[in-house]
Image (cartoon, grey):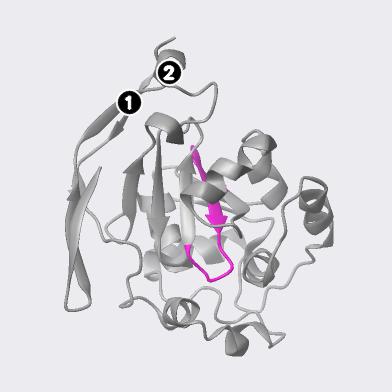
């Protein structure tokens, strides 16, 4: 459960501790400071996504600007994985595969995949973030996409998997990280925050929501988690 409020453009709040038992080990969502939805103090690319200034970002051919300022520790991981600002890989196969499942790779998702698709990022503590739209979609039943859209947005597109979190990006540049056992999801303001969340478990720029009641898909209710 999220408790928070807006004050002069900021949001202050906290997430109550919630413990949910998944299939097997316990999954714990620790209480922590969180921000609510949009955090406009992020990078330039995140601000432009929220403000709707997409034309400048998506019309150029260069891949610069996809990753803005996630921190030097993340940049080291990116460079080690083979990423450069100019990296540009084709996405046609992924686009066709997702379309067959009724999921569209919109321009924001395309830009992310052209820059990062095929890379697996790995932190020193062995946390990984794999940018692969087909693989991310394979981690869930495709017929549960309506639940994803209900939590997030109609334009949700899977682009990566970080540990046990499936990462979706929206047409306006917001992100959602969904636990693969459907116990919790985080809303994150942009790619830089997703990188830090996935590689270092830093979620101070995210809003955590526990999935309960009629928000839980069939087969993922409390009884199933306790089995």
Q: Which residue is under mark 2?
A: 225
What residue range appears in magenta?
A: 161-174
Q: Is residue 8 above or below residue 155?
A: below
Residue 37 % position (x, y): 35, 63
Between residues 51 and 30, which one lies in front from this camera angle?
51
Residue 109, image x and y in percent? 64, 65
Disc 1 target residue: 20
Q: What residue is drawn where x is 83% and y is 62%?
A: 92
Whether 185 is drawn above or below 23: the answer is below
Q: Secondary structure at mark 2?
A: helix
Residue 190 against residue 201 in the figure, above or below: below
Q: Is residue 166 magenta?
A: yes
Q: Nearer the viewer, residue 225 or 159?
A: 225
Residue 159 is situated, as x and y percent measured from the top left of the image, at 62, 54
77 lies above or below 107: above
Is 218 within the magenta?
A: no
The dot on residue 145 is none
Q: How far apart in space, not on screen, are marks 1 and 2 (Cα)?
A: 8 Å
Instruction: Confirm or deny contact between disc 1 and disc 2 (CB under 8 A).
Output: yes
Residue 124 percent location from the top left of the image: 41, 48
Answer with left or right where residue 127 lies relative to residue 112.
Answer: left
Specify few, some or many for label 1: CA neighbours under 10 Å numbering under 14, 14-19, or 20 or more.
some
């Amino acid at each position: 459960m999220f408790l928070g409020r807006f004050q002069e453009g900021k949001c202050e709040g906290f997430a109550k501790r919630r413990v949910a038992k998944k299939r097997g080990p316990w999954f714990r969502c620790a209480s922590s400071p969180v921000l609510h939805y949009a955090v406009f103090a992020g990078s330039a690319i995140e601000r432009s996504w929220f403000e709707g200034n997409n034309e400048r970002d998506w019309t150029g051919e260069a891949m610069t600007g996809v990753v803005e300022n996630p921190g030097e520790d993340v940049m080291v991981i990116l460079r080690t994985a083979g990423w450069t600002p100019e990296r540009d890989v084709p996405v046609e196969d992924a686009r066709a595969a997702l379309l067959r499942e009724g999921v569209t790779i919109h321009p924001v998702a395309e830009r992310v995949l052209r820059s990062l698709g095929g890379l697996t990022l790995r932190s020193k503590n062995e946390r990984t973030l794999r940018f692969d739209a087909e693989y991310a979609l394979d981690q869930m039943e495709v017929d549960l996409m309506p639940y994803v859209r209900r939590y997030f947005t109609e334009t949700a597109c899977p682009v990566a998997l970080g540990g046990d979190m499936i990462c979706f990006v929206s047409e306006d540049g917001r992100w959602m990280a969904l636990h693969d056992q459907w116990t919790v999801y985080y809303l994150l303001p942009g790619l830089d925050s997703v990188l830090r969340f996935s590689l270092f478990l830093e979620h101070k720029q995210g809003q955590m929501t526990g999935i309960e009641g009629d928000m839980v898909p069939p087969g993922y209710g409390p009884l199933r988690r306790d089995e």
